[in-house]
Amino acid sequence: MSMKQWSSKSSMGYSQRNQSDASMFRGDLKHTGWYDTEGPREFHQVKWRFQTNDRIRSSPVIAKQTVYFGSDDHNFYAVNTITGELKWSYQTEGAIKSSAAIANETVYFLSGDEKLYALNADDGALKWSYTTEEKDDPRDPVDYWQSSPAVADGIVYFGAGEGSFYALHADHGELVWKKKLSLCGYENEGLVPILHSSPAVDEGVIYMGLSGYDLSAQKEPGHVVALDAKSGEQIWMSPLVSAVDGSVVVDDNTLYFGTRNGGLYAIDKRTGQVVWHSDIAPYLLGSLALVGDTLFSGSSDSHMFVSLDKATGGKKWMFPTLNAIHASPSTDGRTVYFALGNHYTEENHGLIYAVDAETGEQLWTYQTEGNIYSSPALDHGVVIIGSDDGYLYAIE
């Protein structure tokens, strides 16, 4: 079957989503990592690459033939997806490790200067900014990202340092509510959660991972929490698991996520109770991808990429890699894309993989000059991804 004949709407039994929802981290408000478009099944060429002045750990977000992303060089960029030419850039006062959300012609992102920015998506003009009250400094060497905002029903939601979660008016940046979260059982130990997971939003409820780091005591506890989107009131908190750095994936009545030391979980989105647990992929920093009845996940320590049955957590296939996987995978339903990054070694880093989603067969690879902690975005036969070598790559 040729690429022109194939339609993502019929692949693997999933339904079409509104493409306007696709302009945010992980593709939509449910953070499925599924893109209603085609990625390249064969490697032809690097269509273009765009150079910044530092690492790119922000994941690219695409809207209206423009890819939006940040760099550790403190700049946020808008680049033409067809030509790779710069449309505009905006300088902040900190490294940008957050991915953008785009709604109503506005692009929202967090910077290391403790501000959330709202820029005009067409020309990069500042609409407003909001300064959080907490520092969001990295706690350990694999603390790669900041929370990426989600926009739903005119509200911008995002997490920040020291356990604070914010809801702001998308139009003018005024605070709607703020919620201070804590780790159950650790309130008296001074161990506060870090909110680097990005919020998923579904049916008026926010789902968010919490991570606590006490490396001296070798403790990395975590939870998933459900908050009422209108008020910020806590609906439930999951049983204590390991740190949840990645974002929660929402599907019907179930949430899926990975943890640092506890493997993969499926929990009931109404109660937070565990449905199943799998140790098949230990030490997960990124998010999962979901399409149809299949979950995809990379693992750091096992150097393995896995496909799982979403109902049971049972293995469908496993794909061995040459190094750790920290970034999140993306899929068009036919092919799944992921990349390697490991700050402990320079061997076999920066590899981008394209693997058949049904069989786990390798289709192609391409190697950049730096580790990759940015997650791929897909757009009309092209995969776009950032690298620690400072380049944003468009591969077809």
Image (spheres, rainbow, N blue to C red):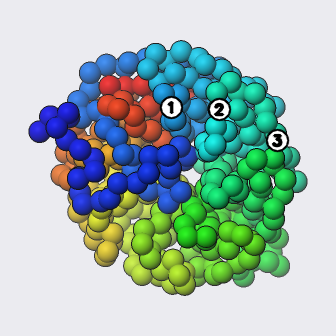
The answer to the question of whether label 3 and label 1 lie on touching residues, with beta carbons closer than 8 A, is: no
Residue 116 lies, in percent from the top left, at: 76, 44
Evaluate whether residue 114 shows in this view. no
Q: Which residue is mark 2?
A: 121
Residue 2 lies, in percent from the top left, at: 14, 34
Instruction: Give the mark, 3 or 1, whose residue is nearer the N terminus.
Output: 1
Q: Quadrant of residue 155?
A: bottom right
Residue 4 lies, in percent from the top left, at: 20, 33
In the visual, does 117 lie left or right of 266? right
10 relative to 315, above or below:
above
Q: What residue is at 42 percent from the left and 68 percent from the top? A: 251
Q: Which residue is mark 1?
A: 64
Three-letter amino acid code of the residue under disc 3: Ser
In the image, 372 versus 354, the foreground residue is 354
Instruction: Give the mark, 1 or 2, whose residue is nearer the N terminus.
Output: 1
Instruction: Give the mark, 3 or 2, whose residue is nearer the N terminus.
Output: 2
Three-letter amino acid code of the residue under disc 2: Ala
Q: Which residue is mark 3?
A: 129
